[in-house]
Amino acid sequence: MSEPHVYTEHAVDVLGHAVDLLNAGQRFVLITSVGIQGGAAREVGSLAVVCESGIMVGYMSNGCIDRDIRLQARSLLETDEAAKTLRYGEGSPFFDLKLPCGGSLELLLNARPDPEAIRTAHKKLTGRNATLIDHRVPDATGIARFLYSPKPRLAIAGRGAVFRATVQIAEAAGFETLTFSPDDADLEAIKHISALNPVFMSSPLAHQNLPLDSYSGFLTLFHDHDWEPELLKAALLTDVRFIGCLGSHQTHQQRLNNLLADGVDAQSLDRLKGPIGLVPSLRNAPSIAVSAVAQVINEFPSSIRSLRSERQEKAA
């Protein structure tokens, strides 16, 4: 890792790097956004890590203050202080560091994070479970407590240009992508994109158990729709958050009629969204992919929820 800054979004990736540093016996500072007023590049609860070499994994701005955060973190490692807070923007002592979006950002820099808490949180997130992390803020009442959800997963079944483009867009959008296709060439073309192994579909009946949960979405991107029914019935047996299908309005209505005739109840069919995409009647694969992934993103809330600790509630 030679770059001084590795831009990554999700807590599971930042915590994964922290676990690697712990395993290597290297010191680091865990950075948490604990307060935001006005506009901000990241949401409250966002995480980053700065190690002794100065490499930062994660980010807190679009470049306007991250360099200073790295310097502040490295300086903290050279002292006996366990933690400190930093404020940027309105009310900050750093008058020469401006937040172009206005408002203010308060950060917690912790040079002695609890190793067990980090390992436990990372294990829960990689196991597709939400996890609580408590951040004790110096000179503050109580603690900053955040609930972190697993990285959103998007399972994509299909073939052809739209399938390939959607996998690329979904991965770039921060989804953990899981791919299914009856076409070896398509799976070969996208196998380097996702960290999860692609799945070859030998027949429409081959996959009755889909690894989908409430932090997942599912898309079927077939022009030959005979591949869809069994996949859709399997997806409807899960608590997947969003199910979308490629095709015209006429195709989608026929899809619903066929599933209804095959014994799927009408209430379950309400979960199927089609035609997929926020922009109608597109004719090129990259645009369809962007439109489809944008619709899925719209269905996912923030992956971080700020909770008030018991001590904070008593003080309020």
Image: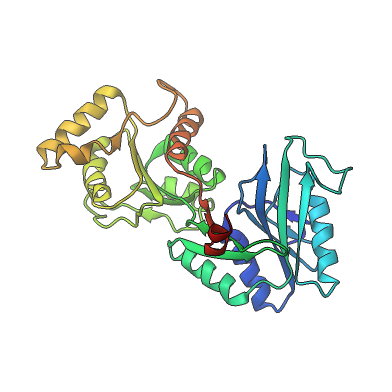
The picture quadrant where one finds residue 209 is: bottom left
Residue at 62% from the left image edge and 71% from the top image edge:
19
The coloring applied to the image is rainbow
Q: Nearer the viewer, residue 311 or 251?
A: 311
Q: Looking at the image, can residue 315 be seen?
A: yes
Q: Which residue lies furthest to the top in this view?
A: 281
Q: Is residue 111 above or below residue 263?
A: below
Percent from the top left, x then y, of residue 91?
Answer: 80, 44
Percent from the top left, x then y, of residue 250?
Answer: 25, 22
Q: Is residue 63 left or right of residue 278?
A: right
Q: Looking at the image, can residue 3 be seen?
A: no
Residue at 34% from the left image edge and 57% from the top image edge:
211
Q: Which of 87 and 4 is in front in this view?
A: 87
Q: Which residue lies furthest to the front in this view?
A: 315
Residue at 78% from the left image edge and 41% from the top image edge:
90
Q: Which of 127 and 204 is in front in this view?
A: 127
- Screen quadrant of the N terminus: bottom right
Q: Nearer the viewer, residue 139 or 216?
A: 139
Q: Is residue 192 above or below residue 169?
A: below
Residue at 47% from the left image edge and 39% from the top image edge:
297
- Screen quadrant of the C terminus: bottom right
Q: In this view, does 210 lie to the left or right of 146?
A: left
Percent from the top left, x then y, of residue 267?
Answer: 19, 39
The picture quadrant where one finds residue 82 is: bottom right
